[in-house]
Image: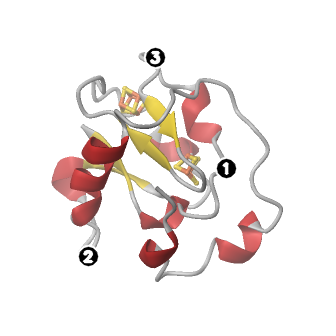
Amino acid sequence: TFVVTEACIKCKYTDCVEVCPVDCFHEGPNFLVIDPEECIDCTLCEPECPVDAIFPEDDLPVGQEKFLEINAELSPKWPVITAMIDPPEDADEWAQVEDKIDLLDR
Ligand code: SF4
Ligand code: F3S
């Protein structure tokens, strides 16, 4: 499965959702997750993210491993999103911030 990682928090550009053939993105207040039960590893979403937040589970950057569990835990709780929406107004200000995990709204 593919995994949405920390860079997405408070950025949520949603370019990724448009290309997913199986609609496996779920939307939370300031983050998106991929449902690992639905992802077919097509790879299409990975290059779409402007902040490179999406990785295959077997190639997660160091420190991002916990997001595998976070995606699995939150995807059943959040609604599916299939169409792009406007990002938060301050998304660009958060794009380069690295330590954002404590800001993840569930
Ligand atoms: Fe959807 Fe493909 Fe990305 Fe999996 S890898 S979330 S199936 S676009
Ligand atoms: Fe998040 Fe990137 Fe998608 S910021 S919403 S994973 S395009």
Identify which residue, 1 or 35, lies in the foreground: 35
- Callouts 1 and 3 close, C-beta under 8 Å: no
Kindly check if marks 2 and 1 are in contact, taking CB atoms under 8 A apart as contact. Answer: no
Q: Say whether residue 84 is left or right of residue 101.
A: right
Q: Which residue is mark 3?
A: 21
Q: Callout 2: helix, strand or loop?
A: loop
Quarter holding residue 10? bottom right
| Label whose residue precedes the other's in the sequence (2 or 1) | 1
Q: Nearer the viewer, residue 52 or 27?
A: 27
Residue at image point 24% right, 53% down:
68
Tell me the CA gap for discs 3 and 2. Answer: 29 Å
Q: Are marks 3 and 2 in contact (CB under 8 Å)?
A: no
Q: Secondary structure at mark 3?
A: loop
Q: Decide if ligand 2 comes within 8 Å of the CB at mark 2.
A: no
Q: Is mark 1 within 8 Å of ligand 2?
A: yes
Mark earlier in primary sequence (1, 3):
1
Ligand 1 within 8 Å of the CB at mark 3: yes
